[in-house]
């Protein structure tokens, strides 16, 4: 496997010693170097790790216990929070009413992408102004308050589309796919001229 050979060669070059002479601390320093200095993507670091692990187990026959290295994590880029004004512009820039209402619900109720796509019509309690989120994180249902503005938006949407089971169905009758909503979010964000980092999950945080 060429990439495995490349990983072992790169390790030897970094350590300036034959890989079979290296200790656990040397390996740890190498992987730290890949993440912090060379800033490789996690998948690339994992590929290098697998190649080096293969070398030690299959070629040098060193026990696996010595190869257990906790790969350092790259610091995640925290999405920049959208302001209320930016959210308003973003929603106005989404021409598809179904996607626009789904995005507004994501923002208004602080939902995850999977949660908004999994909403059913009977999850809305208009009388108590509550939204039931089924099987969210931790597999527990929860109730989320719905603002009067969002409730009116949802009612107008329902009057127009009359969804039966799923609140935001796609053409097949099943829930909209995550890619559809992510693309609608990205396109609306671009149209609204918003350059802040982060995807649709940023609406939940906003």
Image (cartoon, rainbow, N blue to C red):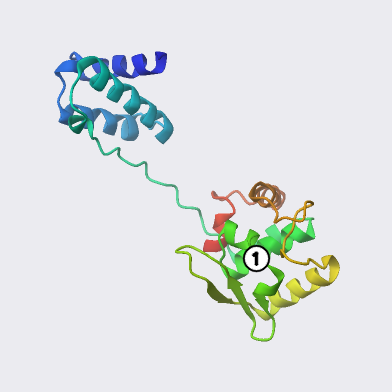
Where does residue 65 sit, x and y in percent of width and height? 19, 33
Seen at 58% across and 63% down, the residue is 83
Instruction: Tell me how many marks there are.
Output: 1
Location of the N terminus by quadrant is top left
Q: Is residue 53 visible?
A: yes
Q: Taking 206 as reference, is 14 above or below it?
A: above
Query: Quadrant of residue 61 in the image?
Result: top left
Where does residue 79 sit, x and y in percent of width and height? 50, 53
* Residue occupied by mark 1: 119
Seen at 54% across and 48% down, the residue is 197
Residue toward you, 173 or 91: 173
Query: Quadrant of residue 4 in the image?
Result: top left
Q: Residue furthest right?
A: 160
Q: Is residue 89 visible?
A: no
Q: Taking 139 as reference, is 20 above or below it?
A: above
Give the secondary structure at mark 1: loop
174 horizontally vs 22: left or right: right
Seen at 18% across and 22% down, the residue is 62
Q: Taking 22 as reference, is 156 above or below it?
A: below
Residue toward you, 184 or 158: 158
Q: Residue furthest bottom?
A: 127
Where does residue 13 sit, x and y in percent of width and height? 26, 15
Seen at 74% across and 72% down, the residue is 154
46 horizontally vs 68: left or right: right
66 horizontally vs 182: left or right: left
Location of the C terminus by quadrant is bottom right
Where does residue 108 sit, x and y in percent of width and height? 62, 70
Residue toward you, 198 or 171: 171
185 horizontally vs 14: left or right: right
Query: Quadrant of residue 175 in the image?
Result: bottom right
For mark 1, does the 10 Å Cα neighbourhood hold few (<14), some (14 to 19), or many (20 or more) residues?
many
């Amino acid at each position: 496997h060429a990439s495995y050979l490349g990983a072992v060669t790169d390790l030897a070059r970094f350590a300036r010693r034959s890989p079979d002479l290296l200790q656990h601390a040397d390996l740890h320093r190498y992987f730290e170097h890949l993440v912090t200095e060379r800033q490789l993507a996690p998948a690339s670091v994992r590929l290098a790790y697998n190649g080096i692990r293969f070398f030690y187990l299959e070629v040098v026959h060193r026990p696996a216990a010595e190869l257990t290295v906790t790969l350092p994590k790259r610091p995640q880029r925290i999405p920049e929070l959208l302001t209320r004004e930016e959210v308003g512009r973003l929603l106005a820039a989404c021409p598809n009413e179904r996607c626009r209402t789904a995005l507004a619900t994501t923002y208004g109720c602080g939902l995850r992408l999977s949660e908004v796509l999994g909403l059913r019509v009977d999850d809305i309690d208009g009388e108590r102004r509550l939204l039931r989120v089924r099987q969210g994180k931790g597999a527990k249902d929860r109730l989320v308050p719905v603002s009067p503005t969002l409730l009116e938006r949802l009612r107008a949407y329902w009057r127009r589309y009359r969804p039966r089971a799923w609140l935001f169905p796609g053409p097949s009758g099943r829930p909209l796919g995550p890619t559809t909503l992510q693309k609608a979010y990205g396109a609306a964000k671009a149209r609204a001229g918003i350059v802040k980092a982060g995807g649709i999950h940023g609406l939940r945080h906003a």
